[in-house]
Structure formats: structure tokens, C-alpha cells
Amino acid sequence: MNKEQQKRVAAIHDLSGFGKCSLTVALPILSAAGIETSALPTAILSTHTGGILGYTYRDLTEDMRPFMKHWKELDIRFDAVYSGFLGSFEQLDIVKEFFSLFKREDNLILVDPVMGDNGELYKIFTPKFAKGMRSLCERADIIVPNLTEAALLLGEPYQAGPYTKAYIDGILHKLSQLGPKQVVLTGVYFDEKELGAATFDMERNATEYVLTEKIPGYYHGTGDVFASALLSGLLNNFNLERSAEIAVRFTAESILRTFKAQTDYRFGVNFEQSIPDLLKELKLI
Ligand code: PXL
């Protein structure tokens, strides 16, 4: 690939108008990181579904295949395909088709298997959906689940933390056995002081932990902030471990700013004002 050529991502997520998550997080972060981002919206909601009642939900399943077909006709090539929140079994099938159509030797398929957090499924999902999501993860190069999603993918009961290294290593290995060569697990902590991510690279048989100070409270959309920053690192040619470090730092800084401002935890984190620091970490400025 021509080194001067800008990288391009296909981001397959919902658009939640308020409450920062999915596309309203992925687009600004990837764009700021210098990456062209094409959006394939799976649904349009007034807000995300996490703790906010009365949201509107317009399903866009019918539009997804025509989007995909048009992009293929235009011969658009992607350096990464990045999927997140999917609303139905049919959308899982469509995204699998998308992967088949746009997979290339040298591109990256990243699946964030958005299904739940804190041991609970998000309201719109059923346990059966987890099986479908597992078959999508089988086709990914890299997956980015939290510990709730990891348990759902593996068909195991959720375990609350703090965790042991043996438990986390076991989860990482089992997830990589599903198919992805790289796994990044979020929400990892071994004590109440620190929290972060664990990475596993199957080809190098390498496991790393990236932990940072734990901030009290639960903040919505942080999985999307993390995965978008991780992909920004990978597409700026940082390795898995360094990209995870960049993403942990960016997410933690965004959470800390939100915590200090005492913003409603459901509204998402202030990642926007961490972008200058992200760009420094990415050596873009
Ligand atoms: O951040 C995950 C997410 C994405 N999209 C929608 C959601 C959620 C989590 O609740 O509801 C619509």
C-alpha cells in the first residue's frame, strides 16, 4: 500500500443521537486520528438504551445491504472494518457478508461484541443473540469484549471481579480459540486500585496487562471510546500492546474529567477534551 495514502475504516454501529457512544464516539476519534471513516449505521436512536427510558429506535437493517452493495460497486477499499452495536440476527448475517466482501490480505476486521456490561445483557438482547455474536467473532482478526461479553461469548457464567491472572489468561486463550488472532479484554482488575485491559496475541503467544488508576462509578460508552482509540493506534502502526496502552490512557483520562465534572454517568464521557493528548500519544502532533 502507498504509505502516503490515508487509511480508511468502515464503522458499523448505531447512531444514538444523545448519550455519547457508538458512531458519535467512533467518528470523531478515528477522524481526529487522521483516519477516513465511512459509517454504516445499524439503527438510529434518540439516545442509547443504557439506563435512559423512552428512546426512539429506527432499525436500519433494510438499508444495510444496499449500502454495502453500493460501496462494493464503487470499489471502496477499507484498511479496517470495525463493527459494534448490532440490533438483530439479520444484522449479524449482513455484517458477515460485509466481512466477506471487504476482507483483504492486509486489512483488519475488528469486532466489538457489544452486548452488555457489569454482568448484565443490554435490554434489547437475549442470551441466544450471544451465540450469533460468537459466530461473528469467529471471523474477526481482533475482538474487544468486556468481561461480561467474554462470558456470554464463551457460554460461561459471568464472574464479578476482582480477578486473578489465571482467570484472565484462561478467558483470553479461550476467546482466541474462537478464531481471532488478537484479543483485547476490557474491565480487567486484580484489586480495587487499578483497572484496565489485557491483551493477547496468539501468534506471539504474548499476554500483557495495561492498568491504570480505577475511578469510581460506571460510565456509559467507555467501551466504544476504548475500541475506537485502540483502532486509531493500530492504524497508526502501533503494536497491539502500545495501542492498548494508548486506549487505556485515553479512556481513563476521559472518565476522570467526567467524574470531576460530576456529569450524569449515562451521558457518556468527555473524550473530546482528551483528543489533543491522544494525538500526542499517536505522535500525530
Ligand atoms: O455503548 C454500547 C451501546 C451502543 N449502542 C447502543 C446502546 C449501547 C449500550 O447500551 O444502547 C444503542
Image (cartoon, rainbow, N blue to C red):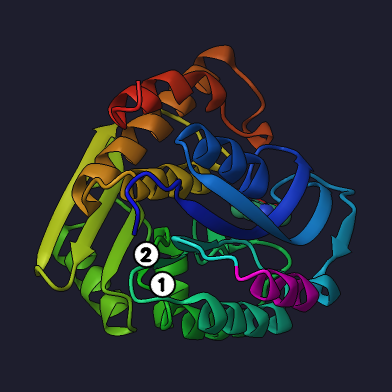
Please identify the quarter of the rendering in which residue 105 is found: bottom left
Please identify the quarter of the rendering in which residue 233 is found: top left
Q: Residues within 10 Å of mark 2 (few under 14, many from 20)?
A: few
Q: Are marks 1 and 2 in contact (CB under 8 Å)?
A: yes
Q: Nearer the viewer, residue 113 or 24?
A: 24
Query: Which residue corresponds to the image point at 32% horizontal and 31% vertical from the top-left?
Result: 249
Q: Position of residue 123 (x, y in %)?
A: 71, 63
Of the residues shown, which amino acid type is indicated by label 2? Answer: Gln
Q: Tag 1, which secondary structure?
A: helix
**In the rendered image of this protein, does residue 274 appear above or below residue 186?**
above
Q: Position of residue 30 (x, y in %)?
A: 51, 41
Nearest to viewer (mark 1 / mark 2): 1
Name the residue tied to disc 2.
Answer: 159
Horizontal side of 15 relative to 272 (left or right) equals right
Name the residue tied to disc 1.
Answer: 151
The answer as to whether callout 1 falls within 8 Å of ligand 1 is: no
**In the rendered image of this protein, does residue 278 appear above or below residue 163?**
above
**In the rendered image of this protein, does residue 126 appear above or below residue 247?**
below
Query: Which residue corresponds to the image point at 65% horizontal and 48% vertical from the top-left?
Result: 23
Horizontal side of 211 relative to 128 (left or right) equals left
Q: Tag 2, which secondary structure?
A: loop
Separation of marks 1 and 2 at Cα, in angstroms? 8 Å
Q: Residues within 10 Å of mark 1 (few under 14, many from 20)?
A: some
Can see residue 156?
no
Horizontal side of 253 relative to 133 (left or right) equals left
* Range of magenta residues: 64-75
Horizontal side of 51 relative to 59 (left or right) equals left
Tag 2 or tag 1, which sits nearer the N-term?
1
Of the residues shown, which amino acid type is indicated by label 1? Answer: Ala
Q: Position of residue 7 (x, y in %)?
A: 45, 50
Residue lying at the far top in this picture: please name it. Answer: 261
Q: Position of residue 241 (x, y in %)?
A: 20, 49
